[in-house]
Image (spheres, helix red, strand yellow):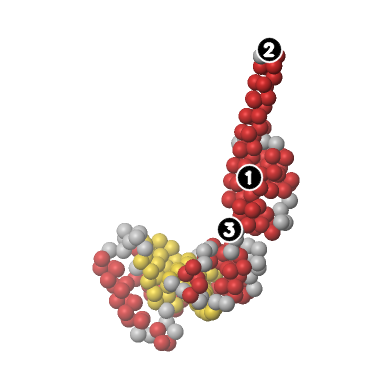
Amino acid sequence: MGKKALKLIQDRTSRGNASVQATASASEEALRYIRRHPSARDCLQSGLLNLSATARIIINQSAAKPALARAAVVMALRRLKPRVAGVSNQAALLKLVTSARLATESGIAVIIFTRAKLVATEARRLRSFQQKYLTQSAHGIIFDIAELPDASVLFCSASLAAEVRHEFFSSIIISHLGMARVVLEFGPKIESTAGVVAYIYALLAERGINIVEEISCWNKIILFVRENDLSPTIEALQSPRLA
């Protein structure tokens, strides 16, 4: 084989290897972007994503920017669509959320204690407070405690907040007054449906609503939001969108 022929083969092999590497890099960058941007994934699933514009964004954000070709990234996005098509369960989530029983209550305080400062005697005293107010639960008094590894979270009626803050002020990390409690009670399918909590967080986040605290237990999800966010929270949960 002559030197020219050998050089031609080596050049073609080198270009082929570079092309394979560029394609692999484009695929990796496209997959990374879609994983980090759920809204882009949803649009890709629905065929609504502007592939060319998205490719430009991916290239501009990529550390491998000089080596990425827009056409390669566009192709990588096209190839991703079948892979993510089965990932979404938006329809199941929509049905689950709209069929949930919704109960709300305003006038709630959320008080967080640090376990490091809540010494044994104070912890027992807090429990005695709970026992005292449990007898009044029939009259609408709320006094619930959630235990965490490094903190205790108290959910109580706003009318009790001043007394609790006075009695345990040295152990309190933060108090949230003017809160509302939203209780979502689901059917049994919640146990086998992935992404319910994330879906609810997304519904509220896109309306600028912050979930201050959240508790999940079996078929219930309990959210604590600001009282002035209660109406838009109810609206978001009763009329969610199918992405």
Label 1 neighbour load within 10 Å: few <14, some 14-19, many 20+? many
**Image point (42%, 75%), residue name:** 156
Residue at mark 2 to residue at mark 3: CA–CA distance:
54 Å
Residue at mark 3 to residue at mark 1: CA–CA distance:
16 Å
Q: Amino acid at mark 2?
A: Gly
Between disc 1 and disc 2, the foreground one is 2
**Circle 2 is placed at which residue position?**
2
**Image point (69%, 39%), residue name:** 72
Which quadrant is the N terminus positioned in?
top right
**Image point (69%, 16%), residue name:** 5
Q: Amino acid at mark 3?
A: Val
Q: Secondary structure at mark 1?
A: helix
Which quadrant is the C terminus positioned in?
bottom right
Q: In this view of the protein, which residue sits in the foreground, 151 or 162?
A: 151
Image location of residue 223, percent across then percent down: 50, 70
**Circle 1 is placed at which residue position?**
30
